[in-house]
Amino acid sequence: MLVVVMMLLLFSRACSIGLGLVYQLGEINNETVTKALERLCGFMPEKIKHPCLVLADFIGPFLVGLVAQKDTPDVVCTAIGLCKTDPGHETCRLWKKPKMDFNVAVEMRRMIMDRLKLTRPVDEDICNLPGIKEICDWVKKIFGSHDAAFDIDSDGYSNFEALRGYSWRGADCNDARGDYHPGARPINSDITDDSNCNGIYGSDPASTRPYEEVFCEGTEPRGVVVLGDSISAHFHLPEEWLDSRKLSKKVFQHLPFIIENEIDWPELSSITGFANNSWPEVIQGPMDSIYKRMFERNRCNHRDYQNIAVNGARSSSMADTIMYSLKRNGEKDYPVFVFYALVGNDVCNGHPDTFAHMTTPQKMHDNAIQTMKYLDKLLPNGSYVMMSGLADGRVLYNSLHDRIHPIGRLNNDVTYPTVYDYLNCLEVSPCTGWMNKNETVRNLTTARALELSNVLKDIAANNASMFPNIHLYYSDFFYHTVFEYWEKKGGQPWQLIEPVDGFHSNQLGQSITAQIIWDNLEQLFPEILGKVNPNNDKIRSTFGDQGGYRP
Ligand SMILES: *[C@@H]1O[C@H](CO)[C@@H](O)[C@H](O)[C@H]1NC(C)=O
Ligand SMILES: *[C@@H]1O[C@H](CO)[C@@H](O)[C@H](O)[C@H]1NC(C)=O
Ligand SMILES: *[C@@H]1O[C@H](CO)[C@@H](O)[C@H](O)[C@H]1NC(C)=O
Ligand SMILES: *[C@@H]1O[C@H](CO)[C@@H](O)[C@H](O)[C@H]1NC(C)=O
Ligand SMILES: *[C@@H]1O[C@H](CO)[C@@H](O)[C@H](O)[C@H]1NC(C)=O
Ligand SMILES: *[C@@H]1O[C@H](CO)[C@@H](O)[C@H](O)[C@H]1NC(C)=O
Ligand SMILES: [Ca+2]
Ligand SMILES: [Ca+2]
Ligand SMILES: [Ca+2]
């Protein structure tokens, strides 16, 4: 729920970003800001267009009153009331220093409110704005649930793509039977139909033996799961939305789908990616994943993936709620390989006193133990759990500090540190500790991250016997190795980072991460990956794409 609140706060408080875009659109098309706002709404798909126009209608009078004076979006947002400044707190600014005093903007708000006969100010909550409430309700519902929205037999697997459907875990080949789902040990050897959705069923006419036995028995099939945060869910806000030169109908055509997937791209992510990219207007780069390679290694693993990652997840929310949306039957399903990958949020937050809101080593220990205990109880015997250390987020500032943010590309006027300061000022930064101009703060954040990683390392080294059902591992090779690898190949670190948030790993970074993780596992812990199935070619020639990924 915290994440939902954070997202809404970010959307509402980032008024200056949205309005800045509208200004630029007007500049490009030589038209008034009011017209540009209508133009932007016109780019939106139907579901969003109407609320957008209602909002434009509401903001219109403010724009006419203020933009005439050619002042910055920061001032206009202050006047609208979407940039409230607490007493004693500086007014947050993304654009150049405005001509108008912010107090005058606040004064203008009163005048405009009087004129519009508004009885109360917008008071920062964008959801109170006309037209926006329905969108807020929609967003709250989406971000508040970690289970599939359409799942008739309640086994957790769905035939709807978004809303925690098969973007997130393999499609359900029978949504009327809970015992039929990806990862199930085949029921009655799948002689008549496919109970585990891997596309393999029926009997070999020559030997009359069931195909599940001929092709899969003894190959130790297994699924892949990630319990993670926005990195594992693959958060990606298209830069095309923030670069005024690229705004068009085309780049917004998938907007409802993208929101219904929580602005995440699990289907293209490093752990559970499986899809061909059908959204090239808004996401580019190669796809590679652990799941994809597990499937290529043993085609009996088809569709057995679960992405249980949630934006903003940290060790506490994982242990308190998120882990319960992992589906596995201890007796009837195959074992799984689980990544426990909470790589930043335990040291990341948007609070001014960022250190006070970091997880302590003791709490980290308790949260991780609680999650491991649950996994030990839930998972089929012989499952594998890999705990990942936290990333060292200093690479973000080091590689972005002198670069222009997409919102500043038109006029070359906004750098990443400016965006960091703006988000920190609004107290909505995804990570004040690392997205910070103060090197001491960044170093201290890394120091805590290292402490927390060591807690996990220690659990894997000393307490694994508490969890007899699972094989427990720890590793911290994932993230820094990715950058080292890329630089050795002559690349620049910023090429692996999401341009809009300056925080997450982008599509290229996700695919390299998959490769690095895989290479390391193959070398160090090949038992986790299972055997190569010698029948893969026969499975392919008999069952083709095994039903693909869409129901
Ligand atoms: C922009 O529009 C105004 C009037 O609408 C016109 O006078 C001006 O020449 C236009 N500028 C450009 C660069 O087209
Ligand atoms: C991706 O595209 C290739 C080539 O068109 C096709 O062979 C493959 O089955 C597709 N994979 C998925 C997961 O749709
Ligand atoms: C789990 O499997 C191992 C062998 O892989 C076996 O030694 C152990 O007894 C099993 N544990 C349970 C609870 O069945
Ligand atoms: C940087 O942060 C440290 C630790 O919070 C603080 O002591 C120091 O004054 C800060 N430096 C600057 C230049 O703000
Ligand atoms: C931060 O850490 C780096 C690398 O350990 C070090 O070189 C640098 O001097 C540190 N800076 C500060 C201000 O502590
Ligand atoms: C974990 O292992 C350490 C070292 O062996 C031990 O002191 C500690 O009690 C164990 N923790 C738990 C929760 O069992
Ligand atoms: Ca289902
Ligand atoms: Ca089912
Ligand atoms: Ca099957």
Image: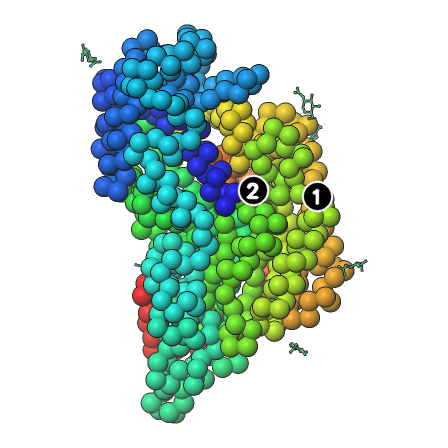
Q: Mark 2 Cα within 10 Å, few/some/many (few <14, many 20+)? A: many
User: Callout 1 environment at 10 Å: few (<14), some (14 to 19), or many (20+)?
Assistant: some
Q: Secondary structure at mark 2?
A: helix
Q: Please name the amino acid that badge 2 sits on.
A: Phe
Q: Is residue 290 visible?
A: no
Q: Which residue is painted at 35% across and 45% down in the image? A: 138
In the drawing, does residue 131 fall left or right of residue 74? left
Q: Residue at x 63, y 56 (%)?
A: 387
> In the structure shown, which secondary structural element does the residue marked by tag 1 occupy?
loop
Residue 35 location (% of width, % of height):
22, 22
x 44%, y 82%: residue? 187
Query: In terms of depth relative to the viewer, which is nearer, 482 or 251?
Result: 251
Q: Nearer the viewer, residue 549 or 106?
A: 106
- Give how far apart the Cα atoms at labels 2 and 1 are: 28 Å
From the viewer's side, name the closer residue of 371 and 512. 371
Quarter of the picture for ligand 3? bottom right
Q: Does 110 sit above or below residue 461?
A: above
In which image quadrant can residue 135 be found? top left
Residue 452 horizontal/vertical position (percent): 69, 46
Q: Which residue is mark 1?
A: 360
At which x and y percent is residue 266?
43, 53
Residue drawn at point x = 32 percent, y = 41 percent: 134
Q: Quadrant of the C terminus?
A: bottom left
On the image, numbered disc 2 is attached to which residue? Answer: 483
Q: Position of residue 6 (x, y in %)?
A: 49, 38
Q: Is residue 213 left or right of residue 21?
A: right
The first of marks 2 and 1 along the sequence is 1
Identify the amino acid type marked 1. Thr
